[in-house]
Image: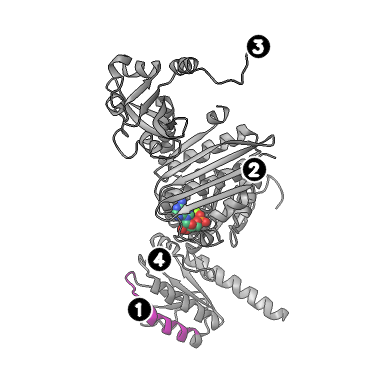
């Protein structure tokens, strides 16, 4: 079922209506900001229903990176899609929790499969809600 | 002499000294006749005071004992330290105020849990808290 | 019948003090010994003739002697009666003691000296040390994160949660979630000795971290006592699934994994 579409310069691709965005191990905030613009453009262009940001190889993410990632998820949500942070590593998680950042409205998943399932569930729910309305 | 015998005294210097305080406190409360839920609740309040000492003053003491009034027995805890003291007690006693990374709910909840609560603090000299819970 | 309401005669008072089974000592304003009872003399192994009128610091050789910590000095300078811990050299051995000092006043209320009694607290200190050792042992028992099922991890928390312990729990939990790609974790707090706001805060943080890992957190062992305490502390565990028993938590964990437990042979 894998349908690779317009692979961007940053190596993102889509699987079943979801845009998969791999983030490089040493990604700094500037790179995430570049990703931010690119992701939103791609979602608008392709009508992707989900954006899975794969952070499983990133060991360090600063508070600025956190803010950018949150903005990405917000933007994605405004475009009617679901953004998910996938595979966050223990070191990153411990640092974020320690800094008392607010991640109450962020979607997260351990694996790509979990993330895809999450997007599907949310989409089905949205569609059911839409039908009711 | 009876009272004196029924007093336990803990010197706190290390975060882990709180283990002793909590465990001894629960046993003490049980011997006094407090029910299980009350033991847990009061020990938690005492733990709050010892955590504050370790966190903000570095070291100090917790004493627990019994007190009597009008034929009723009570559990009394005294927390004392010679730490930095609290510059604004009103603020410290308010919900959600923490000068550190705490939730800022400690002192107000100790006051709520215990029947009697007294706090004295002098900046640069230290803090003394005494609280009593009567056995119903 | 004895008449209780009378002024105790001096001889009797001295007799009583002499036979108290713990050292009692009195000094004049110059801090010279004017009285030391039998127990005191026995402690230092000297006769009254040998020590009479000598500076008390030469006799007692305690850690406070000659320093500003000396309570005897403080009460003579108008301080409150006080009981403090100290250490004394007795026959070359350092002994932990507790002493209480009070000012001695004449009829006019003028301070003429001080009196103190000393209690050997070797046994008490030994007990305290033992307790301390025991708690150190508890500290070294780290909290394990155990894989209970495919994608299910349990973290049983026992004893007291201080910040060091919480950190250890946090990292054990994070590593295990990572290693097993856990989808649900049960934090069993049944064995936690007390729930103060610091402990609650640690638990909330662990639950938050779990969520970031993309894993669901179920807190088990919220007994009525724990629930009542949390309410009194003003803490709400919003966004966290909680259960009273481990059995209920397990049930929920299986549901989250889309699994059901059914008796063998039942039709499903
Ligand atoms: N023993 C103490 N010595 C100095 N400051 C203290 C002490 N206990 C409490 N405080 C001050 O009072 C504040 C409120 O305490 P508390 O209600 O226990 O909340 P928290 O510990 O979460 O900050 C603390 O942040 C600290 O500034
Ligand atoms: Mg506190």
Q: Mark 2 to mark 1: distance in Å? A: 54 Å
Residue visible at 47% across and 75% down? A70
In the rendered view, tell whether residue C251 sits above or below residue A42. Answer: above
Report whether A25 appears left or right of C198.
Answer: left
Residue visible at 60% across and 61% down? C238
- Callout 4: residue from which chain? A
Q: Are tags 2 and 1 found on a single chain?
A: no
Q: Are tags 2 and 4 found on a single chain?
A: no
Location of residue B124 in the rendering, given as x and y in whole percent from the top left corner: 39, 54
Magenta highlight range? A25-43
Disc 3 or disc 1, which is closer to the eye? 3
Residue visible at 49% across and 69% down? A102
Q: Are tags 2 and 3 found on a single chain?
A: no
Disc 2 or disc 3, which is closer to the eye? 3
Magenta stretch encompasses residue B17 = no
- Callout 1: residue from which chain? A
Q: Residues within 10 Å of mark 4 (few under 14, many from 20)?
A: some
- Callout 3: residue from which chain? C
Magenta stretch encompasses residue A32 = yes
Location of residue C165 in the rendering, given as x and y in whole percent from the top left corner: 43, 48
Q: Give the labeled residue for mark 1.
A: A31
In the rendered view, tell whether residue C168 sits above or below residue C29. Answer: below
Q: Residue extending furthest front?
A: C108
- Secondary structure of the residue carrying numbered label 1: helix
Report whether B57 appears left or right of B133.
Answer: left
Q: Are marks 4 and 3 in contact (CB under 8 Å)?
A: no
Q: Give the labeled residue for mark 3.
A: C1
Q: Are tags 3 and 1 found on a single chain?
A: no
Q: Give the labeled residue for mark 2.
A: B37
Q: Give the labeled residue for mark 4.
A: A56
């Amino acid at each position: 079922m894998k349908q690779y579409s317009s692979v961007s310069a940053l190596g993102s691709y889509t699987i079943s209506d979801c845009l998969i965005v791999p983030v490089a191990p040493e990604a700094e905030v500037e790179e995430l900001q570049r990703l931010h613009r690119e992701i939103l453009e791609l979602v608008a262009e392709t009508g992707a229903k989900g954006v899975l940001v794969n952070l499983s190889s990133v060991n360090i993410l600063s508070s600025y990176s956190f803010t950018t990632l949150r903005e990405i998820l917000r933007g994605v949500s405004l475009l009617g899609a679901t953004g998910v942070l996938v595979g966050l590593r223990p070191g990153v998680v411990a640092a974020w929790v320690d800094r008392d950042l607010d991640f109450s409205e962020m979607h997260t998943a351990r694996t790509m499969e979990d993330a895809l399932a999450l997007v599907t569930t949310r989409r089905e729910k949205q569609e059911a809600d839409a039908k009711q309305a | 002499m009876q009272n004196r015998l029924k007093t336990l005294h803990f010197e706190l210097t290390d975060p882990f000294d709180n283990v002793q305080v909590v465990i001894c406190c629960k046993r003490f409360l049980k011997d006094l006749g407090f029910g299980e839920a009350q033991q847990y609740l009061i020990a938690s309040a005492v733990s709050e005071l010892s955590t504050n000492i370790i966190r903000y003053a570095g070291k100090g003491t917790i004493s627990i004992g019994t007190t009597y009034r009008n034929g009723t027995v009570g559990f009394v805890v005294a927390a004392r330290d010679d730490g930095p003291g609290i510059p604004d007690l009103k603020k410290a006693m308010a919900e959600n105020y923490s000068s550190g990374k705490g939730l800022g709910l400690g002192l107000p909840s100790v006051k709520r849990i215990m029947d009697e609560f007294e706090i004295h603090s002098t900046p640069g000299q230290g803090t003394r808290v005494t609280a009593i819970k009567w056995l119903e | 019948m004895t008449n209780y309401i009378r002024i105790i005669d001096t001889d009797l008072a001295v007799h009583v003090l002499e036979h108290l089974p713990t050292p009692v000592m009195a000094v004049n304003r110059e801090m010279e010994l004017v009285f030391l009872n039998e127990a005191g003399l026995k402690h230092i192994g000297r006769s009254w003739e040998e020590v009479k009128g000598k500076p008390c610091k030469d006799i007692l050789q305690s850690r406070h002697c000659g320093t500003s910590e000396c309570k005897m000095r403080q009460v003579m300078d108008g301080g409150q009666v006080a009981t403090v811990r100290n250490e004394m050299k007795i026959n070359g051995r350092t002994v932990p003691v507790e002493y209480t000092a009070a000012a001695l006043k004449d009829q006019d209320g003028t301070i003429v000296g001080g009196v103190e009694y000393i209690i050997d607290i070797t046994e008490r200190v030994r007990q305290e040390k033992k307790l301390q050792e025991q708690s150190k042992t508890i500290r070294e028992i780290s909290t394990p994160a155990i894989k209970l099922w495919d994608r299910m991890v349990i973290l049983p928390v026992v004893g007291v949660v201080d910040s060091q312990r919480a950190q250890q729990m946090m990292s054990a939990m994070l590593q295990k979630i990572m290693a097993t790609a856990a989808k649900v974790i049960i934090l069993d707090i049944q064995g936690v000795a007390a729930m103060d706001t610091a402990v609650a805060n640690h638990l909330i943080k662990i639950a938050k971290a779990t969520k970031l890992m993309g894993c669901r957190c179920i807190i088990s062992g919220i007994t009525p006592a724990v629930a009542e305490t949390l309410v009194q502390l003003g803490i709400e565990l919003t966004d966290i699934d909680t259960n009273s028993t481990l059995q209920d938590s397990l049930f929920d964990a299986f549901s989250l994994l889309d699994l059901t437990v059914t008796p063998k042979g039942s039709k499903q």
